[in-house]
Amino acid sequence: MAKVELTVNGRKVAREVEGRMLLAHFLREELELTGTHIGCDTSQCGACVVHVDGKAVKSCTMLAAQASGTEVTTIEGLSTGADLHPVQRAFNTHHGLQCGFCTTGMIMASVDIINRYGGALDEATVRAELEGNICRCTGYHNIVKAVLDANAEMHGQTQAAE
Amino acid sequence: MYETNYHRPSTVEEAVALLSANPDAKPLAGGQTLIPTMKQRLAAPSDLVDLRHIEALRGIKLEGRRIIIGAATTHAEVAGSEALQSACPGLASLAAHIGDPHVRHMGTLGGSVANNDPAADYPSAMLALDATIHTSTRDIKADDYFTGLFETALDEGEIIVAVSFEAPEKAAYAKFANPASLYAMAGVFVARHGAGVRVAVTGAGSDGVFRQGDMEAALSANWSPAALDSVTVSADDLMDDLHASAAYRASLIKTMAKRAVAAA
Ligand SMILES: Cc1cc2nc3c(=O)[nH]c(=O)nc-3n(C[C@H](O)[C@H](O)[C@H](O)COP(=O)(O)OP(=O)(O)OC[C@H]3O[C@@H](n4cnc5c(N)ncnc54)[C@H](O)[C@@H]3O)c2cc1C
Ligand code: FES
Ligand code: FES
């Protein structure tokens, strides 16, 4: 067993769990934060992406024990109150989702991309940076539009994406 | 995944002691290879010794012309290092194209070099840069370190602490990535130190990463993509699988080598 103490969406939590428990299962089963999805469970699809100490990681490929001591943000912690995060809003506006299964990981990955590039994003960069997130529905086009639009909003640029 | 005991040492000595106390223990770095392997039950270590909290294993240093990279340095840290972007941009760019951003946030140089996947990127850089692998017990030259498919000179319980190499005059990496796995179907790292040129190929050899002697000779005489026109790459000893035939890989090696020289 491993003692896991971490901060999830600003809330301190402590649990005694099996050493093999994945962070994805810890979030979903121990904390009932089921917004983090498990798509492939083989480290390919990115449906399980969350932020650990501000960096996007695949929570199906990290042990809960490895995350002990960190600050984790999941889709549930992205916005406070009734207002959506600009990336969530942009996915809605641009129809960047159909079934929604990939969406939470896609949004967490997108927020990470926008944060890392500090405004300097173009379509080719967004497509390359979304390499680790697979969507079986949308064909990506509207996802890319949503990311560019949210980036413009978050970095105060006036021109709309495309 | 079978149950396992997680440990978090803060020094190399502690990590080595934990590994030698548990014969079925394994080091855990970024987990981007080991955890998927454990999930498939292809590995079942009794204990995992997390190396990511050992300060001595982290960071990138420049001592004169010598570059030293800690084993637990992530791919994202190598890609984003300003020191490397000026001293060896070829290596920073290699790291920037490993897998996807999430893998790069966790995966480490030491984990990749310890694993020695025949399609991994870093082994070719280590071999071409004539790097030294510094372990918890000794220093091993890259030429003696990579010994076959997923095989290295590491002993049980031996930990990679860092790798080091002289900053090259010119170096670059070009890979043809498998579009599904993102691993190399052929990747070529070229490096020039003075008169010496080294060319290492990953993703293609049926015995893992290897040096391409004919290309090294051609590029030592004339450092240009055109110098490689006259080199014939044999398909003997190349991997032949559902992704690519040996002959196709031979052709990719030449194309990637030319691209790497052009980019260096
Ligand atoms: C979707 C995906 C795409 C990928 N694409 C690529 C790619 O394009 N190119 C590429 O090269 N790789 C790729 N990888 C692999 C990735 O680079 C891994 O991070 C790397 O192979 C292993 O590093 P790690 O730190 O994650 O090691 P771990 O998975 O933690 O460990 C791997 C092995 O090395 C041992 N080990 C780790 N550190 C040390 C040490 N310091 N000393 C001794 N032994 C040690 C462990 O015991 C284990 O056996 C990909 C992985 C995924 C999941
Ligand atoms: S569920 Fe984690 S990458 Fe697919
Ligand atoms: S919206 Fe269905 S998988 Fe992306």
Image (tube, rainbow, N blue to C red):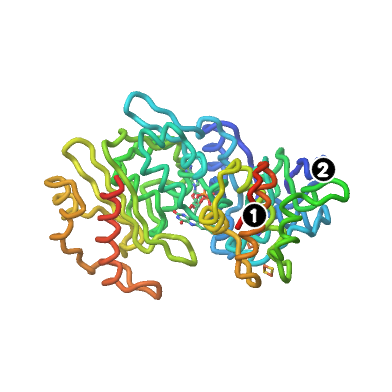
Tell me the crowding category of disc 1: few under 14, some 14 to 19, or many 20 or more residues within 10 angstroms, Cα based.
many
Choose between B145 and A81: the one closer to the eye.
A81
- Residue type for callout 2: Val
Decide if residue B33 is on the left or right side of residue B68. Answer: right
Decide if residue A153 is on the left or right side of residue B167. Answer: right
- Residue type for callout 1: Val
Q: Residue furthest front?
A: A159
Q: Residue furthest top?
A: B64
What chain letter is assigned to the residue under label 1?
A: A
Choose between A126 and B188: the one closer to the eye.
A126
Measuring from the top left, give residue A158's x and y in whole percent: 66, 46
* Badge nearest the viewer, 2 or 1: 1
The residue that appears at 75% across and 55% down in the rendered structure is A88
Disc 2 from disc 1: Cα separation = 32 Å
Q: Is mark 2 within 8 Å of ligand 2?
A: no
Of the residues under marks 2 and 1, which one precedes in the sequence?
2
Q: Write down which quadrant ligand 2 falls in.
A: bottom right
Badge 2 vs badge 1, beta-carbon distance below 8 Å = no
Choose between A21 and A98: the one closer to the eye.
A98
Depicted A146 relative to depicted A115: above or below: below
Tell me the crowding category of disc 2: few under 14, some 14 to 19, or many 20 or more residues within 10 angstroms, Cα based.
few
- Determine which residue is flagged by label 1: A147
Decide if residue B97 is on the left or right side of residue B176. Answer: right
Label 1: element kind: helix
Residue A38 seen from this side: no
Residue B196 seen from this side: yes
Quadrant location of the C terminus of chain A in the rendered image? bottom right
Label 2: element kind: strand
The residue that appears at 24% across and 61% down in the rendered structure is B254
